[in-house]
Amino acid sequence: MLVGAIKTLLNKVDAQENKITELSSENQKLKDEINRLKGEKGKPDIAKNKDDKKDSDDKKKGGKNGGRGKNKNAKEIEIHNTEEKDVEKKDLPKDAQYKGTRDVVIQDINFNLNNTKFIIHKYYSPFLGKVFEGQLPPEYKGSIFGPGIWSFVIQFHYEARMTQNLLFKILTGLKVKISVGEISNMILCHERFEEERQNVREAGISRSDFSQIDDTGARLNGKNGYSIAVCNQFFTDYYTSLSKIERLY
């Protein structure tokens, strides 16, 4: 008799719990509708936690999230080298049948020292009293460091916020003969930035039939100057100058 009473009581508790759950859900829907009419957002719909074990099983079965070592963007990756890897014939059983190939694309970088020795030929004219020499490529002039080191120092310092000491450690670790002072000079070498800016501006202007120009007053080194913008559909050049005349030249 006592057991029957307990079962009846538990059934009533379970029924009451279901009823409370239904009423709570209905109450929340009404609140959400009221908030919607007020222009507010209702209760967010939060997704349930994923079953880690199920995800793990899917990966083992080769589901859409599985496949160890696969690269979803392999078709978009530029290929620089191609190597074929065959099985050693001595390791194959006699009944082995050839079944074609499969592609595996591995991304990597090649970051090595690449020094160049230029042998400059020169000639002397006794009549003119003048020496003639072969010319270095433009990107190698004015420095004992090539464009690769210049690009590395400037890009990693300004974009990756890498300190001069860390740049020094990386470059000397690659056996580059360079000092912290030389790295600092590269970072502060505004002449190269200015030359590059002018080249970009001239190339951008020459590629278009029109360019837009505007300026506004600005202070430069304690003097009244101008902030000047030159642009078209290909580029935008923004700089500060003491004269408006320089803006196109």
Image (cartoon, rainbow, N blue to C red):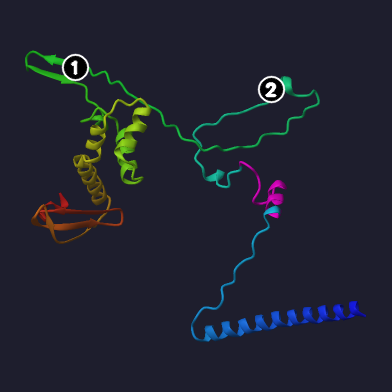
Which circle marks residue 196 in the picture? none
Q: Nearer the viewer, residue 10 or 188?
A: 10
Where is the N terminus found, in terms of image quarters? Answer: bottom right
Is residue 24 on the magenta stretch?
Answer: no
Is residue 60 on the magenta stretch?
Answer: yes
43 up-or-down from 163: above or below? below
How far from the left and from the top, in percent, is residue 160?
36, 45
- Give the residue at the far right of this rendering: 1
Residue type, label 1? Lys
Residue at mark 2 to residue at mark 1: CA–CA distance:
56 Å
Q: Please report the bounds of the magenta region as a residue range.
A: 54-69
Q: Nearer the viewer, residue 2 or 120?
A: 2
How far from the left and from the top, in percent, is residue 31?
58, 84
Tell me what residue is drawn at x 22 percent, y 47 percent: 202
List the residue tagged with mark 2.
Answer: 88
Sort mark 2 into few (<14), some (14-19) or many (20+) by Cα contacts within 10 Å. Answer: few
Q: Is residue 224 left or right of residue 141?
A: left
How far from the left and from the top, in percent, is residue 126?
8, 13
Tell me what residue is drawn at x 61 percent, y 81 percent: 28
Sort mark 1 into few (<14), some (14-19) or many (20+) by Cα contacts within 10 Å. Answer: few
Classify mark 1: helix, strand or loop: strand
Residue type, label 2? Glu
Which circle marks residue 122 in the picture? 1
How far from the left and from the top, in percent, is residue 81?
51, 31
